[in-house]
Amino acid sequence: MSISLFATSVYFIYLADKIPTSAKFSDVSAAIWPKIILGCMIVSCIILFIKSLKGSVSQSHSSGGGENRRLLAPVLLCLAYLLTMRWIGFLISSAIFSITYMYLLGFRKKSRMVLISLAAPILIGLLFYRLLYVPIPKGVWIFKTITEAFLSL
């Protein structure tokens, strides 16, 4: 598994190198974020591969239906996140996604969940929009107005 993820990451880094950049933004381009994430993924794959060689990664087989539901919920949440982002925008859909995902993971401190789910999308949105000049989905109708208000900070 780690070898296939490693190969996929290397291929996507190759593709990220093909993202066109303008001379104005040659230092920080739109390819920087995918390269950072993929670099972290490669390091994780190497660590996983080394652990699997040492035999410290245990394989568990479950036949219970409850385990399948626990695995299916995050997948459906990610699908809903991707499908709704176009209409409600990156900031709002990311806030809803992150608070729901934290709940699914078992976090129950509401104040921390709300703080993280509001701060992270705003900071990431500002990073992409202001620093990297990468457009983010703003949504439609009132959602577009809300997103533009936050991005104008």
Image (cartoon, rainbow, N blue to C red):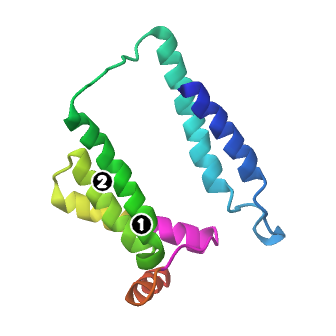
Let me know if residue 135 is in the magenta part: yes
Q: Does residue 116 appear in the picture of this structure?
A: no
Task: List x then y, in percent, for residue 60.
Answer: 32, 20
Depicted 7 relative to depicted 150: above or below = above
Q: Secondary structure at mark 2?
A: helix
Depicted 92 relative to depicted 52: above or below = below
Q: Mark 2: which amino acid? A: Tyr
Q: Does residue 100 appear in the picture of this structure?
A: yes
Task: List x then y, in percent, for residue 120.
Answer: 39, 62
In the image, what residue occupies the spot 47% across and 9% down?
A: 54
Residue that mark 1 sits on: 121
Task: List x then y, in percent, for residue 24.
Answer: 79, 72
Q: Nearer the viewer, residue 139 or 31?
A: 139
Q: Residue 115 vs residue 92: left or right?
A: left
Q: Which residues are magenta?
A: 121-138
Q: Residue 150 vs residue 113: left or right?
A: right
Work out how far the residue at label 1 is from the one at label 2, CA to CA, in angstroms.
14 Å
Identify the disc placed on residue 101. 2
In the image, what residue occupies the spot 65% across and 48% down?
A: 35
